[in-house]
Image (cartoon, grey):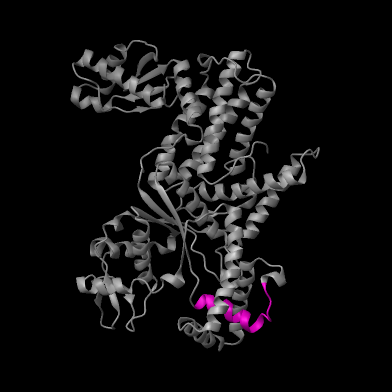
Amino acid sequence: MSIEILKTHVLDRLAEAGRRTFGQAAEGVEIVFPPDLQLGHFAVGCFPLSKQLRKSPAEIAKTLAAAISADEVIESAAAAGPYINFRLANRVFFGGVIDAILAAGDRYGDSPVGRNRRVMVEYLSPNTNKPLHLGHLRNAALGISVSRMLEATGHRLVKSILINDRGVHICKSMLAWERFGNGATPASEGVKGDHFVGKWYVRYAIESEKDPSLEKSIQDMLKRWEEGDPKTIELWKRMNQWVYDGFAETYRRFGMDFDVFYYESDTYKLGKDVIGEGMGKGVFARDERGNTVYHLPEKQFGLEKNGASKKVTVLRPDGTSLYITQDIGTAILKVTQHNLDSSIYVVGSEQEHHFKCLFSMLGALGYAWASNCYHLSYGMVYLPEGKMKSREGKVVDADDLIAGMVELAEEEIRRRDPEHKLSDGEIRQRAAVIGTGAVKYYLLRVRPTQSINFDPAESISFDGFTGPYCQYAYARIFGILEKAGQRGMEGGSADLALLGNIEELLLLKMLIQFPEEVASGVAEYNPSRVAVHVFNTAKAFNQFYNKHAVLQAGSSELTAARLALIRATAAVLKRGLNLLGIDVLENM
């Protein structure tokens, strides 16, 4: 009997009691958990019934509770002020939840709410003049997790990336290598490709301070690129490929994957024809300087201080486009190519105004799907040194951070293995899972809009609000189940009626609430709902296990019952971590 069937049974009995006592069904109420599970397993507030029955909620609760007798599901119903607390039969309550979880397996918490809706999640958006940094990792962690959560709720996912592979900043690394590289390559230097190219971007910044004339050389190179000069294009392709090869290693290591790759070199001319069509419809206009502009709706954007309407330039007087121009074209291209119902852009909070303007323009152009475009905005990631500055080379490199976290994890594993039972290979494999999981969890445990002060030492801790803490709870359960199997305790007759102490109830409550947290996380595009719940589930398990024996519970029936409970807990922990893009380990 699933949890939904149990809730329906309680509500049906409540409705029946209302008909017998007040002449009408008690409807419109919701089932919640009481603040103290020792008072009951479910609670129903009678506030919605007060107006229609013209009685106080406390009086209604008392009358209804007295009219509800015990049955095979409900052991008792008792009024507590304006609430009715229902105590269910432990066998039914625990059995219904555990059976539902174990039957669903890796799909527990899934729902069909997004069935057949096609959605694109665009994330990462790197530049090909430098390696990925910590900010990109937050972007990627959000993109990976939101994609998995959307898939879990029936959406048909298209994961895309827009690579900024052209422009002045790309030419800077090209020019520096051309002038000062002496033919060096990533292979000759033994350096990852994106790091190699990033070194020349930083070198340009240094050299341009000595020689301001380099700025003109950059503009000349950009002009040659736009004109299709073969030598410039060949250099551009060669250096970009070095970067792509480097990016691919980072993608693999952090678990990023994409179905579609968009390149700015292909999309930067898009949007101009749309602007032309919009001019004919009166969506755009020309200002006194000859710019083509979009006047932002007053209701949504307000007015300038002088009372004039706010505006956004979409074409310069010479007809050249801006970023928002190509974003208009790319947005239309994405929907057209993939028949999307909605489109999610994972981009930092500094671009909030940009996307607000973009979606407004798309709506004004008549695209109904514009209302289904969403900017998943996220805050900055800070370190003790302050905000990251890639131009000066003072950036927390993604590869270095991941490698450092894996190293910290390896140190912790070796500390916990004083007898050296683990091989170096096993240690490295575990450290990779723990280290990358620690980064992801730390970046996902708070709401996306909240800025983060990243603390590597805290994030890798096996104790506290961390990924390793959650992974360790799963491994701890696996170890118990493994011992049970070795001792022939698996498959025993479980008497779930023996369950019901407060720690078991609190743990079961966390298992029940998991699907609700997944649904809320999807509705809000907020993986922290799942991250926090996974942590609280791990915490509830540890509180239970620290107080109650499983393998030496006192009887084979109670041992079997507790094994069933922790097996369901392991399934929820694994599924929750999976939705965050984090792997589990059976042994840590």
Residue at image coords 61%, 67%: 194
Question: As displayed, is residue 328 above or below residue 29?
Answer: below
Horizontal and vertical percent position of residue 365: 25, 65
Decide whether residue 46 is among the magenta residues. no
Which residue occupies the extreme right position in the image?
419
User: Magenta stretch mostly in which secondary structure?
Assistant: helix
* The quadrant where residue 24 appears: top left
Q: Residue at x 70, y 51 (%)?
A: 407
Asked if residue 502 lies left or right of residue 277, the reply is right
Give the left or right position of residue 125, taking residue 58 as reference.
Answer: right
**Residue sitting at 55 percent across and 76 percent down?**
236
Is the residue 270 above or below the residue 228 in the image?
Answer: above
Residue 437, horizontal then vertical, whole percent: 59, 47
Q: Please name whichever residue, 210 or 474, is drawn nearer the observer in this view of the structure.
A: 474
Residue range corresponding to the magenta coloring: 168-185
Image position of 342 (left or right of 413): left
Is residue 305 among the parts visible in the rendering? Answer: no
Q: Residue at x 55, y 16 (%)?
A: 494
In this view, 503 is above or below 303: above
